[in-house]
Amino acid sequence: MPETTTTPRTKTLPKTERPKLYKVILINDDFTPREFVVTVLKGEFKLSEDQAQRVMITAHRRGVCVVAVFTRDVAETKATRATDAGKAKGYPLLFTTEPEE
């Protein structure tokens, strides 16, 4: 009778990586009313009144402020929607995204 050898099968599990995160950044301008910026921050990013005020003031004083950190698709969508809200009202409100380090 021939001798058979069996080798165990090894399962290779796919290695899943965490998605890269992106910062949504508010860029200050001297034309968009502060109240409107706070309204957009509350509506699009679900910030409280106090948080939205702090983000707006930080952007006003420093020129830019990180609003939140999301996965790439979410960050780009929120930044685009917030920027479009400003454009719809005729303001140069600008949100951008960049990879988190």
Image (cartoon, helix red, strand yellow):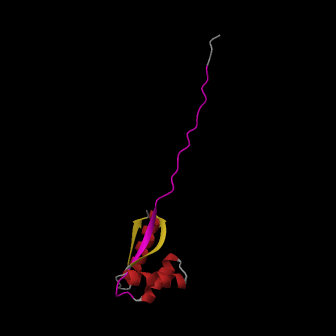
Q: Is residue 45 magenta?
A: no
Write down the region rendered in magenta.
Answer: 5-32
Picture residue at 54% right of the left edge, 85% below the top: 50
Q: Which secondary structure type mostly characterizes the magenta part of the structure?
A: loop
Q: Which corner quadrant holds the C terminus?
A: bottom left
Q: Is residue 15 above or below residue 58?
A: above
Residue 2 is situated, as x and y percent measured from the top left of the image, at 62, 12
Q: Which corner quadrant holds the N terminus?
A: top right
Q: Is residue 101 above or below residue 63?
A: above
Q: Nearer the viewer, residue 55 or 89?
A: 55
Residue 5 is situated, as x and y percent measured from the top left of the image, at 61, 20
Picture residue at 47% right of the left edge, 85% below the top: 38
Q: Is residue 21 above or below residue 79?
A: above
Q: Quadrant of residue 8?
A: top right
Picture residue at 53% right of the left edge, 45% below the top: 14
Q: Is residue 27 magenta?
A: yes
